[in-house]
């Protein structure tokens, strides 16, 4: 995956609009596609081997659509990008596994943060709770541990339901991928899957399980996905903006 953030000025005078955008090369893409989301703004997905010198023409052709779409997400995007003072979240919700935590913060003069689990559904965080780096680090660990508790279990259940077996599973915190599957049927899952609605998390896990049979996105692969997840097209569409489900404290951007 390759990313860059150029600013585009159409030099041929077809439009005087400049858009900020990111380009993502996708081996799965067959055409150039434009996506606009609050999280990423304008994203252009191009097939492998696409010559980016054609982008200005594409953008100027679609400029009216892009402007409308950017305008629609502008308020939400401004909120997302605005620098906000750090605060521990008061609640942590993991819709994928229907779990919720209340977070109690207690400032103390200690050097480090500590986390206590006194009662179910509640965590108490003590120490310099206004320190962003320490807070992110601690919550990142918490997210990983929770994901390690829940996601392998969910994968086991889905593996049983679908009769698709895998070798092992690892949980990671990753910026760009929700899941992957190796040639040896080792599945890797992104801890942030916990923030997705249950049907989307389920879809990602089923998608990876299907890769244990077809290590590609061939027609046979999608037929297998469709058998276990008939709504997969809608799920794929929803996944394009799924990063918007990840709260700021857990974002790796
Ligand atoms: Zn895939």
Image (cartoon, rainbow, N blue to C red):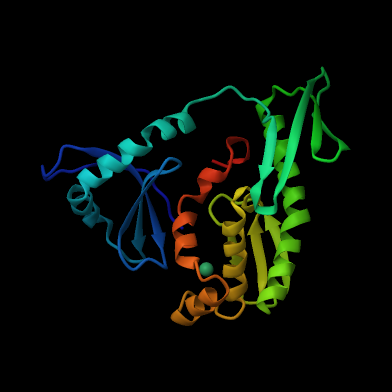
In the image, residue 154 above or below residue 10: below
Using the rendered view, name the quadrant where residue 11 is placed: top left
- Residue drawn at (45%, 78%) of the image: 218
Residue 3 x %, y %: 42, 50
Q: Would residue 227 be seen by someone viewing this image from the given angle?
A: yes
In the image, residue 17 above or below residue 49: above
Position of the C terminus, as image quadrant, is top right
In the image, residue 53 above or below residue 131: below
Residue 108 x %, y %: 82, 18
Residue 32 x %, y %: 30, 60
Task: Say whether residue 136 is left or right of residue 2.
Answer: right
In the image, residue 164 above or below residue 149: below
Task: Say whether residue 59 is left or right of residue 136.
Answer: left
* Nearer-the-camera pick, 205 or 162: 162
- Residue drawn at (75%, 42%) of the image: 142
Residue 145 x %, y %: 77, 49
- Residue drawn at (75%, 32%) of the image: 103
């Amino acid at each position: 995956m390759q990313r860059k953030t150029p600013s585009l000025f159409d030099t041929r005078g077809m439009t005087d609009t400049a858009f900020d955008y990111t380009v993502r090369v996708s081996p799965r893409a067959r055409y150039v596609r434009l996506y606009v989301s609050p999280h990423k703004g304008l994203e252009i997905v191009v097939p492998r081997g696409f010559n980016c010198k054609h982008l200005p023409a594409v953008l100027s052709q679609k400029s009216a659509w892009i402007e409308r779409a950017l305008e629609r997400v502008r308020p939400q995007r401004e909120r997302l990008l605005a620098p906000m003072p750090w605060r521990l979240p008061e609640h942590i919700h993991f819709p994928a596994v229907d779990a919720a935590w209340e977070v109690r913060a207690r400032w103390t003069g200690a050097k480090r943060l500590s986390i206590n689990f006194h009662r179910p559904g509640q965590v108490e965080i003590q120490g310099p709770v206004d320190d962003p780096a320490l807070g992110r680090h601690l919550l990142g660990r918490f997210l990983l541990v929770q994901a390690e508790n829940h996601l392998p279990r969910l994968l086991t259940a889905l593996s049983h339901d679908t009769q698709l077996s895998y070798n092992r599973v690892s949980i990671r915190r990753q910026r760009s991928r929700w899941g992957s599957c190796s040639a040896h049927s080792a599945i890797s899952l992104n801890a942030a899957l916990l923030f997705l609605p249950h049907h989307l998390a389920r879809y990602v896990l089923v998608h990876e399980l299907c890769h244990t049979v077809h290590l590609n996105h061939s027609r046979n692969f999608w037929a297998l996905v469709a058998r276990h997840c008939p709504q997969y097209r809608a799920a794929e569409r929803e996944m394009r903006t799924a990063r918007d489900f990840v709260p700021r404290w857990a974002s790796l951007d």
